[in-house]
Amino acid sequence: MIQKLWIKHVRNLTEISIDLLDKKHCYIYGDNNQGKTSILEAISLATEFKSPIQDDLDKVMQEEKEECIVGMDLNEEEPQRRYIRFNRNGKKELLKNSKSTTKKQLQTHFSDYISADALHVFQKEPDYRRKLLDKFCCLKSDEYQQLLRQYEKVLRQKNKYLKQETSDNLFIETLNKTLSKVGASLVNKRKEALKEIEEEINKAKADINFLEETIQIQYEIKRIEIGGCDSYETAFYKTLTADMEKEKILKYSLSGPQRDDFTLLINKKYIFDYFSRGINRSFAILFRLAQLNRLKEKKTLVCLLLDDTFAEVDDSNKQKLLSYMRKQYQLFYATTRKDNNFLAHDDQVIAIHNGVINYE
């Protein structure tokens, strides 16, 4: 849990320090473009070593400054002080308890940033959901990461080969056999991961008394028909074989895990098609929390970084979600206005204006 923060030259934060004192959570409010999100971004820099918003760290630093710095005190059984300096030349300086350390040694902890864009998990294209799922599976399992790399490597090799003027069917068959075997392992592990997430969502939903309906997450296999006694691997290989001539014309592979999708259903109805944006957003948040609960088995979750996360969620459901999250995690919650209805006794309330903070 974070006890103190020191931030220098991160966007419009020239230099600030935050001490939670005897509080667990931090409630930050202010108008747009005042520095709320910059505080969350700085915490991510100190825990994830990257910004959740901007890939180019040069743009995170204040203009005309050559570095940005974040210091952090973690209140744990063994107290930890972190000091991270990012230079414009790409170099980093990492200190743990005043001693030089490596990124790998600090990756025992993590934070998670959830913004108003959380809704995208059900709104955006299948590729977006696949990447989210693959990221989760990779964080959970080194084996999955290796399988995914192998599959993507062979898929690139096949697609490159299909673009040639002439091709050997026997070589394509060899690639297809590898794709079907490795792809079957990927799909099985994806299904297992979604089952875990589904269980976590239903458990959280029951804990906070949020809707009575049954929640299911359905993995959707595209183009591959699994019939009779066929396994996925066999059905996938048959599809690749049947598509061989078509793929040679189109110059790319038509089926496999890289085409699949998943969706969340409430009482067997697709959430995006039949439920409000507020309900979609609430379950997008629960979907992310379910992932975090499973990832906590491998790493220590420092805190959740909430950036106007509850936009379009009604007050009743917002209160339920916030109460649940407060019990489970430390929260740094940034929003545009102070609302006493959503404050708790263990919230350190901070107002921010032009990069300057005031305690309340």
Image: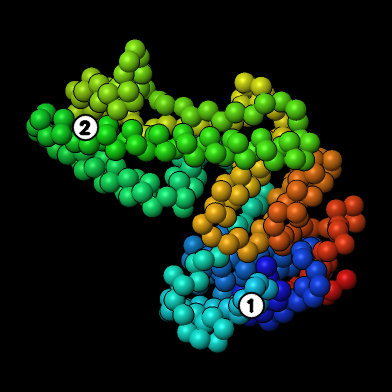
Identify the mark at residue 329; answer none if there is no mark. Answer: none
Circle 2 residue: 176
| Quarter of the C terminus within the rendering | bottom right
Q: Amino acid at mark 2?
A: Asn
| Quarter of the N terminus within the rendering | bottom right
Q: Earlier in the sequence, mark 2 or mark 1?
A: 1
Circle 1 residue: 79
Residue pictured at 27% horizontal, 34% vertical: 181
Seen from this angle, which residue lies furthest right? 340
Q: Quadrant of residue 213?
A: top right
Residue 63 seen in the figure: no
Crowding at label 1, few (<14), some or many (≥20) Cα neighbours within 10 Å? few
Side (left or right) of 326 relative to 251: right
Q: Position of residue 196 (x, y in %)?
A: 55, 39
Q: Amino acid at mark 1?
A: Pro
Q: 321 or 63, which is in the foreground?
A: 321
Residue 192 seen in the figure: yes
Q: Quadrant of residue 332?
A: bottom right
Crowding at label 2, few (<14), some or many (≥20) Cα neighbours within 10 Å? many
Helix, strand or loop at mark 1: loop
Q: Position of residue 85 (x, y in %)?
A: 53, 80
